[in-house]
Amino acid sequence: MCRSIVCALSIDCHFALMFSDAWDGTCKRFGEELLRRFRDCSPAGNHCNNSVTIDLQRHDKPGSGPDYIQYIAWFLHDVRAGRPHWRKTRRNANQSGDAIGRCPESFLEELRMKLVSSPRTIFAAMLVTALLLIHAAPAQNTPRRIQVTAKRFTFTPGDITLKRGERVVLVLTSADVQHGIRIKELGVDIKAGKGQTTEFAFTPDKAGTFVGHCSVFCGSGHGSMALTLHVVD
Amino acid sequence: MLRAVFFILGAMLLVLLLAICIGAPFINCKADPPGKQETVVMNWAKHRILVHNKTQRSPLNNNAATIADGKEAFSHYCVACHGLDGQNTGVPFADRMSPPVPSLAGRDVQSYTDGQLKWIIDYGIWPSGMPGSKNMLSDDEIWSIVIYLRHLPQAGSLGEPEMYTH
């Protein structure tokens, strides 16, 4: 059962590599999930888990994709054999400068055969892939939430950087009297009553620096109560 | 030498006290309306010398949305003295101040440039009762008020400020 999941996740890493344009944190997240699940059932335990995590971070950069897959395969091989993984990796790295090393071809072949031949593994792979993709899809579309607190002529934070085209939700909380934020250029208009929280979703469609002011008269410092949005490409 | 200085200062203080005592019955701080000559002189001085920023232009577009913004900003506290319509409608003390609160639709006010009106709202006018609003209102709000002043509604058309109707 455990091996099936691990194999499925390693397959999913292949899928993720194919789907993603660049080698980014996506595959690392899959890898971490792989290791988290492995920790619960692996005879190698946390020691192995930590060493692999460190190496994954080091190789989480463009061009490391194939190395990463190779590494997972090697890791599986060691875990299956019940060998501690960390010391071996470090020794290899120190001696040859190659932190990845090579997984025995025999095991790679065995793994490929298992992946191709086992219906249960393929089913598990498809299931896990589907679940991960379904799980990942809403995460990409979920707008970033930005909490802003208004109190006594100040917005906190007073400077916010946004990405052009990235949908965000401005969550305005007033800690004293009624306040508001209005940025005409970006179509932002939000008000929060005394002690209340209000949300406003928008997508900045132009780059630049935009200054919004409190839109509800709130006292002697009202005119200088400002929030600056930096929208970058 | 030091005694001479003290003597002169003491004498000056005595003269000042005498002047106050003798002049008090004739000079007072009643808020009487200014005389015609005083009004003419002060109007000339304000338009020509005292109110700055004659050439600055409004950065805002002159459209219905900006006028509505100006009307909204005007309602924050300008209405307390100028009424909702900027013509003192419903303001009980408007003609009891010295100088009286002017109608913002009148020629004296409308003949200021946009930049001068912005300056007046920013810094106020001493020694009238007009306060400065810089930092109490944002620049955009003040410019929108200037535009609203150029498009004031008919006197009395907006009713009286709520604060005076209870």
Image (cartoon, coloured by chain):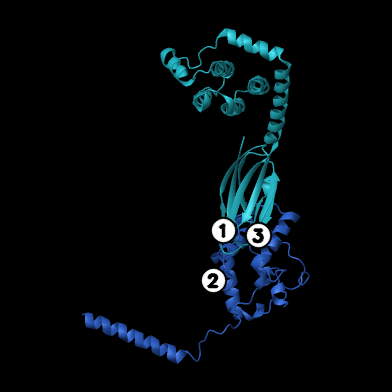
Residue indicated by mark 3: A216
Q: Quadrant of residue A115?
A: top right
Q: CA distance from mark 1 to mark 2?
A: 27 Å
Is residue A21 or residue B136 the one in the foreground?
Answer: A21
At mark 2, the secondary structure is loop
Number of other residues with Cα within 10 Å of mark 1, as a class: few under 14, some 14 to 19, many 20 or more? some
Query: Which label sits on residue B126?
Result: 2
Report the residue at 62% width, 62% height from top: A177
The C terminus of chain B sits in image quarter: bottom right
The chain painted cyan is: A
Q: Is residue B96 left or right of residue A74?
A: right
Instruction: Give the letter of the chain under mark 1.
Output: A
Is residue B130 or residue A91 the one in the foreground?
Answer: A91
Report the residue at 73% width, 65% height from top: B152
Query: Which label sits on residue A57?
Result: none
Number of other residues with Cα within 10 Å of mark 3, as a class: few under 14, some 14 to 19, many 20 or more? many
Q: CA distance from mark 2 to mark 3?
A: 28 Å
- As displayed, is residue B45 above or below residue A95? below
Residue indicated by mark 1: A153
The chain painted blue is: B
Q: Closer to us: mark 2 or mark 3?
A: 3
Report the residue at 65% width, 68% height from top: B78
At mark 3, the secondary structure is loop
Instruction: Identify which amino acid the numbered label 3 is placed on.
Output: Val
